Image: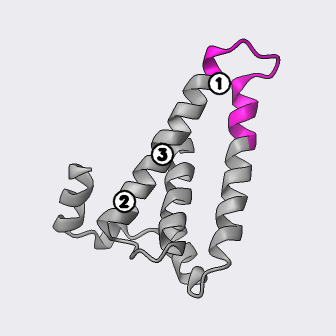
Amino acid sequence: MLVGIYAYLGRTRAFLAGYELDSVEAYLISLAAAFIGVAVFSLTRLRQQQIIQEAVIGITYAVAAAAGVLAIDQAPHGAEHLRDLLVGSILWVTWPQVLKIAGL
């Protein structure tokens, strides 16, 4: 779920940059953001900390979710984009979409 919030931020960034939501560029930006999130948490785990990692993960999730909502609020069709992200469309997924994601 935590990687999903970074993918959401990447997809939101791609949307704000002008890419279509189902474009290859949007998927790649979303994938890159997810990898950045994974790298950050894997690097923070290597250090001895006074704060447990679960607390860092929870705070990061809340901040990233709020940042995504605030960022998408600036878009002209942000409400529709936010609804698509929150609700999803698993019942209407086509085979080309499945193959595109499998390729990524």
The boundaries of the magenta stretch are: 45-59
Q: Is residue 95 left or right of residue 54?
A: left
Question: Does the magenta stretch mainly form a helix, a strand or a loop?
Answer: helix
Q: Which mark is residue 101?
A: none
| Displayed quadrant of residue 101 | bottom left
Q: Residue furthest right?
A: 50
Give percent across and percent down for residue 48: 72, 12
Reading the image, the residue beneath label 3 is 34
- The structure residue drawn at horizontal position 75% and vertical position 42%, both measured from the top left corner, is 59
- Residue 74, relative to residue 6: is it above or below? below
User: 36 or 89: which is nearer to us?
Assistant: 36
Q: Is residue 63 left or right of residue 21?
A: right
Give percent across and percent down for residue 19: 41, 74
Q: In the structure shown, which secondary structural element does the residue marked by tag 1 occupy?
A: helix
Q: Earlier in the sequence, mark 1 or mark 3?
A: 3
Mark 1 residue type? Thr
Q: Earlier in the sequence, mark 1 or mark 2?
A: 2
Give percent across and percent down for residue 73: 67, 77
Mark 3 residue type? Ala
Q: Which mark is residue 44?
A: 1
Give percent across and percent down for residue 13: 54, 65
Q: Residue furthest bottom?
A: 76
Dot 2: few (<14), some (14–19), or many (≥20) neighbours within 10 Å? many
Reading the image, the residue beneath label 2 is 27
Check if residue 46 falls in the magenta segment.
yes
Pointer 3 and pointer 2: residues touching (CB < 8 Å)? no
Q: In the structure shown, which secondary structural element does the residue marked by tag 2 occupy?
A: helix
Check if residue 89 falls in the magenta segment.
no
Q: CA distance from mark 3 to mark 2?
A: 10 Å
Tally the marks: 3
